[in-house]
Image (cartoon, grey):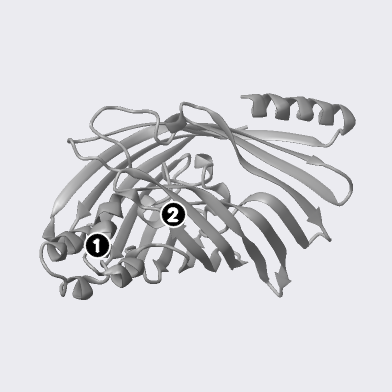
Amino acid sequence: MKKIFLFSTILTTSICAHAEIRINGFANMIGGLTSNEDVLFDYDDDLSFDQDSLFAVQVSGDVNDSYTATAQIVARGENSYEAEFEWAYITHEFNDSTSVSLGRIRVPLFKYSSTLEVGYSYHWIRPPEPVYDVSFNTIEGIRVDHNGYSGDWEYNLQLFTGSFKGNVVLGGLDSPQDIRNIIGGSAVLQRDWFSARIALSRATLSIDAPVFDPLFTGLTQAGFGDFTETLRLRDDSGQFAEVSIEVDKNSWFVSGEFTRRGVDDSFLPEQDSYYITGGLRIGSFTPHLTYIKHDGDPKFITEASTLPEPLRTITIGALTGRGIDTTTITAGLRYDVDTSVALKIDLTQQDNDFNRADTSSTLLRFGINYIF
């Protein structure tokens, strides 16, 4: 709270000194529950309004004719609405087409990265979680933006580099992660009703995974230290790629997005995920349907099969537990009840087919999105 008070004091001073202060915000108030005792996207069979609800304020102001400062403060329900700085950066505009931003910035991995928290900007309650499930969305670094036209085509290019430190949950435990040497870029091409996007990035990752510590200790003590280092996620190279296409004819739309991510020589599997979505705009109503697929085969099973018992069974079980094979279908309805206000309801069913588990979970979510 001291940080927020300090920021408010600085902001008040800035408003007095500069007339060009812009304040806007957005909020998502979302409730949801599952149809049984299964947990899906952190929801269970008790009605909860914490997981996807948030309130945010974005403030930007002109430092001078060339520099602009931007900060975004977000209070999430899952964090008891404690306000945190999501973005905090300064931008230098070279001209109307090119700019560079420095600070805590959103990394453009996905189609909806820049508006990921702004529920009003898309038709779902949330963009498909199996596709958008990454351990970080912001970095401390630099981003260069360039946009322009080539004939009838509009394009936008972004290059970025930086680092990130935080926690990721593995096996139900917080696991500190250090992601360095992040470098990547994205390109968007658009003309009339058609748009396409591609993004590529790579980084050096280290994750301390307490859930794997007993396994790593057992392997090392048994003389398999080299295999332990292969599985351990320490200074390993990770890659990410994304491609998306959209056709939007105003009265209807169809789009899809594909991602591939992987980390060399680690217990994390290479993952492929994609969605295909479509909807109709009928007055103020937008019914929509989305199909989502997420796959990730466990690695090093062959190598683990050569271990002596009981290490073989324990290691194969731990690696197999990282495997993924889910199919998710979401049907929903958006109703634009008024200017800048939308009501939504989504029904999601996910089938887990990995190792023929054949389990199914159903999640109902509903709520309101608005911007101001």
Please say if 172 is above or below 250: above
Vertical comparison of 124 with 267: above or below: above
Residue beneath label 1, please? 221
In the image, taking residue 58 as reference, residue 137 lies left or right, namely left
Q: What element carries label 2?
A: loop
Please tell me which residue is depicted at 53% across the width and 50% down the height of the picture: 165
Q: Where is residue 236 in the image (x, y as percent from the top left)?
A: 45, 67
Amino acid identity at mark 2: Val
Real-space Cα separation, disc 2 to disc 1, in angstroms:
33 Å
Which of 216 and 339 lies nearest the eye of the viewer? 216
**How far from the left and from the top, in percent, is residue 161?**
63, 62
Which residue is more in the foreground, 335 or 221? 221
Q: Which of 266 and 247 is in front in this view?
A: 266
The numbered mark at residue 153 is none
Q: Where does the image place residue 342, in percent across and percent down from the top left?
A: 49, 35
Residue 345, quarter of picture: top left
Point out the tag, 2 or 1, that comes first from the N-terminus.
Answer: 2
User: At 34% across and 70% down in the image, what residue appears?
Assistant: 230
Q: Are marks 2 and 1 in contact (CB under 8 Å)?
A: no
Residue 368 pos. (x, y %): 46, 31
Which labelled disc corresponds to residue 134?
2
At label 1, which amino acid type do we have? Gln
Residue at image x 36%, y 52%? Answer: 209
* Residue occupying image coordinates x 71% and y 64%: 147
The residue carrying pointer 2 sits among few (fewer than 14), some (14 to 19) or many (20 or more) residues within 10 Å by Cα, namely few
Which quarter of the rendering shows the C terminus?
top right
The answer to whether residue 269 is seen in the rendering is no
| Residue 106 seen by the camera | yes
